[in-house]
Image (tube, helix red, strand yellow):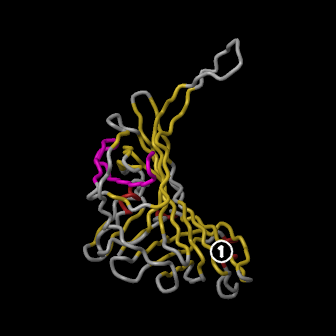
Amino acid sequence: MVDWVAVVLAKKELTYGVDSVPTVGANGILTRNYSAKPVDLDRIERNLDQRVFGALASVPSNERRTTSYEVEIAGSGEAGTAPGWMELLEACGLAAPVLTADTDAVQQFALPGVDATSISQYDYMSDQRRKAVGMVGSFTMDFTAGAYPFIGFNWLGMIPAATPFDKSAPGAVDLTRWLQPVEVNTDNSDFLLDGYAPALRSWRADAGVTTAMRNLVGKRYVRRGNHSFTSTAVIEAPDIATKNYIQSLRAGSLVNWALDHGTVAGNILGLASEKVQITDITESNEDDTLMWTLAMTHTVEGGTADLVITAR
């Protein structure tokens, strides 16, 4: 019997697909809702004509690893030092954070043509170790009132040739770089859409990063391609005379958007987009209050960044 005790280590690779050897002392990830397949693969079917009924054996092909988990969103504890989750976001298409000492760490999606970042990941189920290299992924974000904010990661990577599965207990894992987040609420959080601050129930985003296993003759790797950052905000519907989001929807307007969270230096996060387009409004009832779910696309119109993350 193997106990369900999950430990995840992840480290940025210097060379794509070359094991960066994450360690328990420096690369532990404080996860929740961990899920994985030991091996994910395709099967080659032969589809031969035969003189009896029944299934033929298939052949396994294109081995890979898929994992997913969530991490809480909090700062590093020191302004100007990047939180641990920013390294994970690099493997989802964001550039390395730009650090300003004692001030902030700023991160946004990398431009096309920039060498893709990847991670090596060791994940343990009790004392059973599984390895993956060349891992890239996509992510979601969730800021819901009355809860801690978090990022959800979905990873795709290759299985290395050397000891991909073995018996090796991780030992004590240092997780001190993962601070406790603060609750999403009126005291800690501010939300602005087109210069107006609606009452916010939740904001959820999907980076929409495309990933695919490329299995060719002479080359095998995980391709990370384009992304499309979209989000939904559930708000109390404002008086139309105060803020007319219906008109913004009808006109296809591009508006600014910002979400700030946290109050203490070293644990403050800012998210911002200059040109967001409201693409749909759905109405619902909550406690006899009219609620709107606004669907939004964070655009790169005019060369602006679709997402800027600032940890300060």
Work out whether residue 13 or residue 96 is closer to the camera in this orientation and state it. 13
Binning the other alpha carbons within 10 Å of mark 1 as few (below 14), some (14 to 19) or many (20 upward) gives: some
Can you say whether 19 is above or below 195 in the image? above
Work out whether residue 99 or residue 143 is closer to the camera in this orientation and state it. 143
Say which element carries label 1. helix
Q: What is the span of residues highlighted in magenta in the rendered image?
A: 1-23
| Residue pictured at 56% horizontal, 71% vertical | 203
Q: Quadrant of the C terminus?
A: bottom left
Work out whether residue 190 or residue 247 is closer to the camera in this orientation and state it. 190
Work out whether residue 280 or residue 75 is closer to the camera in this orientation and state it. 75
Can you say whether 99 is above or below 194 in the image? above
Q: Position of residue 11 (x, y in %)?
A: 32, 53
Q: Position of residue 299 (x, y in %)?
A: 54, 63
Main SS, magenta residues: loop
Q: What residue occupies the far front of the structure in this picture?
A: 1
| Residue pictured at 26% horizontal, 58% vertical | 25
The answer to whether 157 appears left or right of 230 in the picture is left
Q: Position of residue 175 (x, y in %)?
A: 32, 64
| Residue pictured at 45% horizontal, 45% vertical | 1
Total marks shown come to: 1
Residue 195 occupies quadrant: bottom right
Residue 282 occupies quadrant: bottom right
Residue 167 occupies quadrant: top left
The answer to whether 117 appears left or right of 304 in the picture is left
Q: Position of residue 305 (x, y in %)?
A: 46, 65
Residue 14 is covered by the magenta coloring: yes
Which residue has dot 1 on it? 248
| Residue pictured at 25% horizontal, 73% vertical | 101
Q: What residue occupies the far top of the structure in this picture?
A: 51
Q: Amino acid at mark 1?
A: Ser
Residue 165 is covered by the magenta coloring: no
